[in-house]
Amino acid sequence: MKRLINRLILALVPPLAYCVIKLLSWTMRIEIINGHIHDDYLRKGRPLILTFWHGRLLMMSAGYRGKGVAIPISLHQDGELISRTMKYFGVRSIRGSTTRGGFSAMREMLKASEEGYDIAITPDGPRGPRYRVQNGIIELARRTGMTIFPVTFNASRKKVFRSWDRFLFPYPFSRGVFISGKPLLVPQQISKGVFEQTRLLLERRLREITDRADRYFEKGAGDR
């Protein structure tokens, strides 16, 4: 019985999730702040690394405007749901994470970058700690020479779940905002100390734009 239920979930949830995300993107009024930062880079045809917190994942497929993107997704069952949902958006899934299947995931991301794919990474996933950048994204950027572009999302009306990542679900007909941060290039030759400084710098930039997004719809918020 449990196996049958799991099969039904895997069959029904991804297409439903796809429809929900499309409905949200059609009904929401979405603003894009500093989108030119990575759009200019995309027009040059050079693959890049997009990064955003795990809890802001839901609407990122609606904001992507590149030619093709691959995203590492955990080997857990919830990862399978995300993978099947992303397939509807034409997103290439790379199974594995920093906790399970990490080496194979890194190998597949390197291969995808060589094939011209952009890479999207939730640097605090798949299990946290929330808002803490893990080493994998810095190592990927070091090996590939790809530039990291931090981005975040918020909505004027939403549900924030009590999960470890404080998963954000925007309501239909609300206002949404994508905010891009300053890009980050990681040198291929780098000491352990500078590696850690770079990780902390990316973490700080992601936190800063997320804080700005979280204040964006406050009455009288000035920094827009």
Image (cartoon, helix red, strand yellow):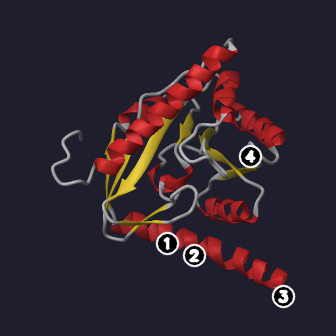
Q: Nearer the viewer, residue 218 or 69?
A: 218
Separation of marks 4 and 3 at Cα, in angstroms: 29 Å
- Disc 2 versus disc 3: nearer the observer: 3
Measured in 3D between alpha carbons, the distance from the residue under mark 1 to the one under mark 4, in whole angstroms, is: 26 Å
Identify the residue at image location x=68%, y=51%. Answer: 92
20 horizontally vs 208: left or right: right
Q: Residues within 10 Å of mark 2 (few under 14, many from 20)?
A: few
Left/right of residue 8 with respect to residue 18 in the rendered view = right
Kind of residue sitting beneath label 1: Val
Identified by mark 2, the residue type is Leu
Q: Are marks 2 and 1 in contact (CB under 8 Å)?
A: yes
Alpha-carbon span between mark 4 and mark 2: 25 Å
Residue 1 — which label? Answer: 3
How far apart are the alpha carbons under marks 2 and 1?
Answer: 6 Å
Q: Amino acid at mark 4?
A: Ser
Image height of 169 relative to 199, above or below: below
Q: In the rendered structure, are the residues bearing label 4 and label 2 in contact, judged by CB atoms less than 8 Å apart?
A: no
Q: Name the residue tied to disc 1.
A: 20
Disc 3 residue type? Answer: Met
Marks 4 and 2, the one that precedes in the sequence = 2
Q: Earlier in the sequence, mark 2 or mark 3?
A: 3
Check disc 1 and report its element: helix, strand or loop.
helix
Residue denoted by label 2: 16
Residue nearest the viewer, comparing 100 with 19: 100
Residue at x 37%, y 43% (from the top left corner): 211
Q: CA distance from mark 3 to mark 1?
A: 28 Å
3 or 1: mark nearer the eye: 3
> In the structure shown, which secondary structural element does the residue marked by tag 4 occupy?
loop
| Direction bottom: furthest residue | 1
- The residue pinned by badge 4 equals 97
Which of marks 3 and 4 precedes in the sequence? Answer: 3
